[in-house]
């Protein structure tokens, strides 16, 4: 499964607009946790049982670009064998691991 960008919601969503008005920490309290939850749900669609195998490719440069929240996304994933690869090596690594 390839996720091309982190699943942040629409910044102009009316519910989010209301939260912004009521809570100065709206990003930390609502926006970021909702995006993290969406990523976890996507990963959960890939692996549903202990015998399932799969590969989740997160293709968003913000995860390696020094954003303070990047670690929170990675820590939320249900696995710990996370690899950072240049884009030109991704297909080769997937083939090595899963094409038996």
Image (cartoon, helix red, strand yellow):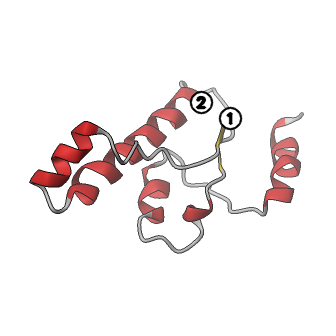
Q: Which mark is residue 32?
A: none
For mark 1, what is the residue?
54
Q: Secondary structure at mark 2?
A: helix
Instruction: Write down the quadrant of residue 15 in the picture.
Output: top left
Instruction: Write down the quadrant of residue 54 in the picture.
Output: top right
Q: Are marks 2 and 1 in contact (CB under 8 Å)?
A: yes
Which of the two residues, 18 or 65, is positioned nearer the viewer here? 18
Identity of the residue furthest to the bottom in this view? 66
Spot occupied by residue 11 in the image (x, y as percentages of width and height): 36, 48
Q: Relative to residue 57, is residue 90 drawn left or right?
A: right
Spot occupied by residue 48 in the image (x, y as percentages of width and height): 53, 25
Q: Can residue 48 be seen in this snapshot?
A: yes
**Vertical order, 83 against 92 (above or below):** below
Q: For the residue carrying disc 2, how many other residues have a C-alpha within 10 Å: few (<14), some (14-19), or many (20+)?
A: some
Q: Relative to residue 85, is residue 67 drawn left or right?
A: left
**Vertical order, 76 against 63 (above or below):** above
Report the Cα–Cα distance between label 2 and label 1: 6 Å
Locate the C terminus and report the quarter of the image it occupies. top right
Spot occupied by residue 90 in the image (x, y as percentages of width and height): 80, 52
Spot occupied by residue 17 in the image (x, y as percentages of width and height): 23, 46
Which of the two residues, 85 or 15, is positioned nearer the viewer here? 15
For mark 2, what is the residue?
46
Q: Residue at coordinates 15% horizontally, 62% vertically from top-left?
A: 24
Q: Residue at coordinates 10% horizontally, 52% vertically from top-left?
A: 22
Q: Secondary structure at mark 1?
A: loop
Which of the two residues, 24 or 85, is positioned nearer the viewer here? 24
Q: Residue at coordinates 67% horizontally, 59% vertically from top-left?
A: 83
Q: Residue at coordinates 87% horizontally, 46% vertically from top-left?
A: 96
């Amino acid at each position: 499964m390839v996720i091309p960008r982190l699943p942040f919601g629409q910044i102009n969503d009316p519910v989010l607009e209301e939260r912004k008005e009521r809570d100065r920490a709206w990003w930390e309290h609502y926006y970021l946790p909702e995006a993290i939850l969406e990523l976890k749900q996507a990963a959960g669609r890939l692996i549903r049982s202990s015998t399932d195998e799969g590969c989740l490719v997160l293709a968003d440069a913000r995860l390696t670009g020094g954003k303070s929240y990047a670690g929170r996304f990675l820590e939320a994933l249900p696995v710990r064998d996370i690899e950072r690869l240049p884009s030109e090596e991704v297909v080769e690594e997937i083939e090595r691991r899963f094409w038996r």
